[in-house]
Image: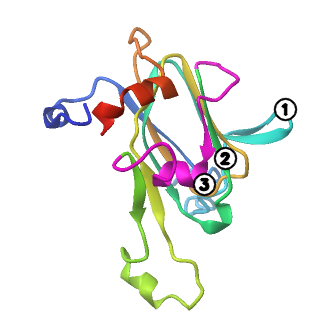
Amino acid sequence: EMTNRESITKFPRDELKQASSYDRTQNGPWDPDSWYNNKDYGYFIRKEVSKDRTEYVIMEENGPGCIVRWWIPLENTYRNRIVRIYLDGNSIPVIEENYHDFISGNSFVKEPFAFNSSDEKDSTYQLGMPVGHPKQMGADLYLPIPFSESCKVTLDENPFYYVINYRVYEPRVTVESFTRVVFDNAKKELD
């Protein structure tokens, strides 16, 4: 589907959802005190304690589906966080990587599936920022991460900004969940 241009001409039969760090204090236009709230970072679903660590759940979905796009800013102050992706109710993650490296293509996922999508050259106003001010950079991941029963994504530190787009399929749809073995066996196709 990612390489078939014809597929974009068809209306999808599945549902596209998004998990993000949106501002949970914004209620709607009926609440003028919160309508313009825009602190859209640092939010998560809940904290979980797993063994000796606290994990921040940033995405959770039941049923068959697939993560199809992920965006994060590349902030050096958040460079050492670990992302864990748990599929199908397993307590052991199928992916446990440095978050920054995983999304930016410096892990087992490489371009064109993960890469720096913006840097200081993308925005002219960044050239006028004070010396020493951190440049704003972002990264995207387009590697499909399918799941047959459920998906939970966690970080080991409070999240900053993030956007995870994923599809949810009808319960009768059969999906083969992501594994590193399947990924490694698909190297020729991925290349």
Helix, strand or loop status at disc 2: strand
Q: Amino acid at mark 2?
A: Ile
Q: For marks 2 and 1, give the CA distance.
A: 15 Å
Task: Name the residue rendered at 45%, 90% in the picture.
Answer: 128
Instruction: Kindly tell me whether residue 135 is visible in this rendering.
Output: yes
Of labels 2 and 1, earlier in sequence is 1
Seen in the image, is 186 located left or right of residue 39? left
Q: Amino acid at mark 1?
A: Lys
Residue 54 x/y as whole percent:
80, 41
Q: What mark, if any, has residue 23 been given in the picture? A: 3
Q: Mark 3: few, some, or many residues within 10 Å (few <14, many ≥20)?
A: some
Q: Nearer the viewer, residue 35 or 168?
A: 168
Residue 186 x/y as whole percent:
36, 28
Q: For marks 3 and 2, give the CA distance.
A: 23 Å
Dots 1 and 3: beta carbons under 8 Å?
no
User: Which of the image's four quarters has the N terminus?
Assistant: top left
Of labels 1 and 3, earlier in sequence is 3
121 versus 156 height, above or below: below
State which quadrant residue 109 falls in. Answer: top left
Query: What segment is highlighted magenta in the picture?
Result: 88-112
Q: Which residue is mark 2?
A: 82
